[in-house]
Amino acid sequence: MSATAAAKPPAPPARRILAVIVLVPVVVTLALWAFAWPAARVAPRDLPVGLAGPASATAPLQQQLEQRDGAFDLHRYADEPAARTAIEGRDVYGAVVVTPQGPKLLTATAASPTVAQLLHDAVSRQIPPGTELRTDDVVAAPAADPRGAALGSSVLPLALAGVASGAIVTLLGLRGLRAVTALAGAAALVGLAGTAIADSWLGIITGDWWVEAGALGLTVLAGSSAVAGLAALLGPAGIGLGALLVVLLGNPWSGVTSAPQLLPEPVGAIGQWLPPGAGGTLIRSVAFFGGSGAGTAVTALAIWAALGLTAVVLGGLRGRKPPTPVEQEHPLPEPVA
């Protein structure tokens, strides 16, 4: 049977038209749900916040904050230095210090400007009218990006770079170690280029340059490995599934523009185990907090990269056909240049 005769006939035009009519609204509906629903339901959910000072002095404020059932996860600290250490270690987003001079709010706009504003509004409503609320930004966002908008918008390009790298490697037919080399090389270059733009030029991240480059590169590698690995296992459909996980779900569920604890459950928790969410948390940690709080993010990204690259290698071995006995006895001559 000839290759032409064996080829599968194309789908009838009516079926293709119906597929477009149905598929496009389904994708758009999914995208609107994934992006708009979390944004419309932003509110604190077990948001880690500290209370510092004598128990007798902090008890009234603690009772008031606990009345917002499930909004805050309160941590007690003996004094202001302990609360500052907790903020710098990313254990809490902020803390209220009760002093004889009145309440003092410690925030970290580098962790989330949205949360810093939310805490200011929440505490202001709990203190007696006319009482001055002093505020101290313990870990401030950089002057070049005080609202975190530029950093938040940087996660989507990294996700797209990961999907593009994985798709290109797949479509070019690279397999095994060649595919792994291409994915790792592309991720490393994106990390260097991204850090040159975000740190050296724009100044929206301000940590150790090479650590930041590694964080950006690992974020891209996790996404590209996921796409290429799914494609190695499932074929071209794996590219679409990878794009769904990394971009369509991973980006809006990352919490990088607000905070994971402000997103509806379980979206915030799931997002931190997808490459964009883990990458956003890792970048914040290395850029502003000296790497504190990066453990879970590194673990999530390493798992995606390891599983994806393993699938790529195994897919390459599976696609390699062993030589037939005839080819072993009579190998084909080398082409003449």
Image (cartoon, grey):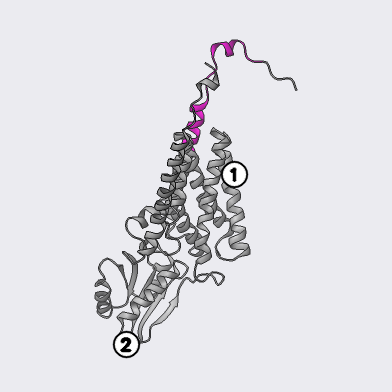
How many numbered marks have been drawn onto this rendered protein structure? 2
Mark 2 neighbour density, 10 Å: few (under 14) some (14–19) many (20 or more): few
The residue tagged 2 is: 129
- Residue 314 in magenta stretch: yes
Image disc number at residue 185:
1
Kind of residue at disc 2: Pro
Q: Secondary structure at mark 1?
A: helix
Q: Pick whichever, 6 or 294, lies toward us.
A: 6
Tell me what residue is drawn at x 54 percent, y 21 percent: 3
In the image, residue 176 above or below residue 153: above
Q: Quadrant of residue 234?
A: top left
Q: Residue furthest right?
A: 337
Q: The magenta stretch spans which residues?
A: 309-332
Mark 1 neighbour density, 10 Å: few (under 14) some (14–19) many (20 or more): some
Q: Secondary structure at mark 2?
A: loop
Tell me what residue is drawn at x 52 percent, y 20 percent: 5
